[in-house]
Structures are given as C-alpha cells and as structure tokens.
Image: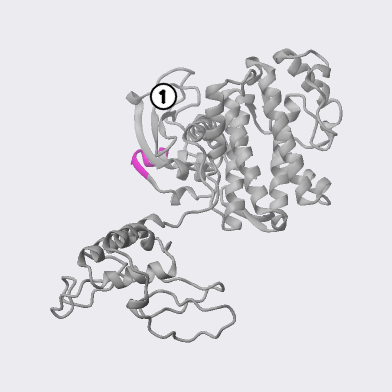
Amino acid sequence: MSGPAYHDGGDGNGRGDGDDTPRVPFQREQRGPQGEPAQRGPLGDPARLPAGEPHSAPAPSSASALPHYDHATLKSLLGAWALSACSSDESLAVEVHLTDCASCAEEALRLRDAVGLLHQEESLDLDPLLRARVLEGCLGRRPARIPVPEWAGPYDAEAARLDALLRDLGDGYWSTPVEMRWFDEVPVSRQFTVGQVIAHLTAVDSLVARTIGLPGPSAGGPVPFADAPGGSGGSGGLTARARFWRARGDAELPIEPGQRTEAHWSGQKHLPGATLRSLWREQSHHLVRTVSFAGSGASEIDVDYGPFALPLHDAFLDRAFECWLHAGDIADAVDYPYEPPAPRHLNRMIDLAARLLPSALADRRRSGLAEPPSQLLPAGAPGRSLRLEIEGDGGGNWYLPLDSPGAAASPEGEVAHVAMDGQEFCQLAAGHLQPEHAAAGKVGDRTAIYDVLYAAASLSRL
C-alpha cells in the first residue's frame, strides 16, 4: 500500500530491512493557534502543554499509565483517530495499539488515505449560476404570472451576475484600472476605471430604455407604465410612451454609443462608485420589468444606435453580450474567477453575432475592406455559403451567405468551413482577438474565410 499517509523506507513491500514490525501510519501534522507546527510527543501525538508553560519535549509516556481499552474499543476508535477527533489519551492508546496489531495498522492506513480524499480544496465563492438555477427551479414549481420574455432572459441573468460581482468586490475597487479592447481595423486598447465601465453600460443601456419610453437614469426614475401617454400596456402604448420620453429631455444626449458614453462620463464623473452601480442596476431592473409587461409585439420595435439599429429582442441580446464581456474585463483586472453564461444564453448571443455577419461583411465590401462578391444575387437566390461551426457549450452550425446579405445560404452552396470554440468566437466578435490570431479550423476559400473573420471582429465597439 502506498500513499501520502505514511513513509515506506524499506524494501518496497512495507517492511524495513526484513523486519516484520507492522507499519504505523503517521498522524496528520497539526498546528498551534498561531499557525506554527504543534510540538509532537514521542508517538506522533501533538504535545499538550498547559497554557503559559514553555514548550519543551515531554517525558516519554508509559503505555502502562494509559487507560485500558480492549481491542474492539480501539478498533472502533480508528475512524475518529483518522479524522483527528480523538482525545489525547485515546490518540495515544490507539497509536500504541497500532505498533502491536498489524490488522488495525493496515485499517488505519486505509482510513487515513480515505480522509485525505475527503479534504479537497474547494472555493468558498458561490457558483455564479446558482441564482439562475434557483430561479429556474422556483419558476418550474410556480410559473410567474407575468414571465420575463425568453429573449430578455440572457440580459436579466448577466446583469444579475455582474451585480453580484460588484457587490462581492466592494467599494474599494471602483478606481481599479480595467483594460477594454475592441477592433477598429487595428486592435484598440484603453484603460478605464471600474466606475467608468459601469457608466458605459448605463449609457448604452439607456438607448434601449429611451426606445421603450423609460427616462434616463438621472431623470428621477421611470413613471408608471399606465401614466405614460398612449396607454396602459401593449406595444402600441409602449411606442407612444417612447415618443413621449424622447421629447422630454433625452434628445440632448448623442445616439452613437461611444459619444453617448463620453457624455455620461462627463455628467457623472462626480458620482461615487456605489451610486453608479445603483443607477445602472435600477435601470436594468426597469428594462426587464417594462418589456415583461409590454407584450409580445414590443420585441420588433427598433432600437436606434445611430449608425445602425436592432430590433428590441436583438438589442437585449446585445446588452447581455456586453454585460458578460465587460464583467469579464473587470474580473480579469482584479484576478477574480468569472464563468461564461449558461449554454442556452450563450447560444442566443452567438446566434445574434452570426446573423449580423452578412451585413457586416457587406459594409466592409462597400468600404473597400473586403473582396467584392463573385456575383450579385437577388434576395432569396442560392449562392456561395460559409459554414460557421461553433463547438462547445452553446454551439451549433450557421450557414452564412457570401455573395449578398439577402442571398440564401445552404449546405449545397458551401465553399468554406470555419470551426471555432464558442468562447473564442465571442472574444473575436468582441474585438479581444485579432482575426489572424483566432484559433479556428479553416477549410475552403481562404479569402472568404478571412473576410468573415474580419467581419466578426468589426462587430466590436467601445
């Protein structure tokens, strides 16, 4: 038998130089109150000294002075001894017995090895997905009267995870520098504080908020849904409410996300970090609550980002993606473990990026940054396709048209195949990776492959 519980200095069969003395396992090292190794007695038991007395080697204890225990009692104490749960007299009696009883010594070794397996180091941090699992279990037993739309679920979960991270870090980290990266034909990297990252999320989230009629985070809080002009629910009332609030004072802020962020930084630079977190979190709660009451028709309302627009359901996925990535940026800055989203949420984020790739590729072609298509096809016509295979949790297969965004993509038209890990693809779409450095399997038309990889990186922004 081998293992960390004993040292075999003999012939490899547990005997020392042919001696038949039973093997005696060592007691685990115990430490004193200040962390120093405890002084050990003659048989491996830590010496018990009265408080205040100097540490010195005690006189050897006599086995005859020990309380008498029969074999059955001593054998029953082996489990407690292996766990260091015996009293001093019991430990000493067991260890003296182990020098005379080979069967008990072997049993003690097996128990000590088993105890070593039970004491694995585990993190005391809660599982980041615990909240999602608890809510899923609760809603499975009692569905919500007004459930959160499925397309808003990823944002709800990622905002909650980021909020838990900020609460765990506390108020001492708001000025910690965080590296934020994106891709603008060349890699761009800038450092901001944790507070600025949260203010950036607040600024871009407010573009979604203004679309559904919520005031900005500094406007004193949203009015009740029924008080907004145009109705007491439904997408019609939501649209009228949005027009109302656009006319009430949000128009002075830029629409383009980068410029809007700069405006938020300028207007909120005096606010402490805890207030920035509170403004962002309150706004995220109002976003989820409002779309939950709005009805299914609200998902198609367009959110204006300035240079582009997204339907509301895609805008929520975009915000979930940003929330996760910037939470990861913060976690990297403070050396904090941070897990990826739940697979079903990650799949929705990857699907959004894949659906945006044909338009991003067309934009690059119009700017002269990508090779022109081999032919122009009308909408719905079959053409060349690239198969994007995403591996791992949340993965799948997507066929992307290469000749025009409206062309039909299919396996029959496949001329190129790219295989990537899901998180690697998300890092590429976030601009955290250069396209030529992305770990991807590539087969087929190399020009089309690199055009698509660069189009994926061009999806990133501040």
Q: Residue at x 71, y 44 (%)?
A: 200
How are the residues colored? one colour
Report the number of numbered marks: 1
Q: Is residue 250 above or below residue 166?
A: above
Q: Which residue is mark 1?
A: 409
Determine whether, in the image, residue 166 is placed left or right of residue 136: right
Q: Residue at x 61, y 21 (%)?
A: 144
- Check disc 1 and report its element: helix, strand or loop: loop
| Residue 28 showing in the rendered view | no
Residue projecting furthest to the left:
18
- Residue 445 in the magenta stretch? The answer is yes
Q: Is residue 298 above or below residue 332?
A: above
User: Which residues are drawn in magenta?
Assistant: 441-448
Quadrant location, the C terminus? top right
Residue 412 in percent (x, y) is at: 32, 24
Residue 30 in percent (x, y) is at: 45, 71
Closer to the camera in the image, 110 or 308 = 110
Quadrant location, the N terminus? bottom left
Residue 135 in percent (x, y) is at: 57, 31
Q: Quadrant of residue 413?
A: top left
Q: Is residue 431 above or below residue 344?
A: below
Q: Quadrant of residue 281?
A: top right
Q: Is residue 184 above or below residue 404?
A: below
| Residue 413 showing in the rendered view | yes
Q: Residue at x 74, y 18 (%)?
A: 238
Residue 23 in percent (x, y) is at: 23, 71
Mark 1: amino acid: Ala
Determine whether, in the image, residue 72 is placed left or right of residue 380: left
Crowd rating for badge 1 (residues with CA inside 10 Å; few <14, some 14–19, many 20+): many
Closer to the camera in the image, 20 or 368 = 20
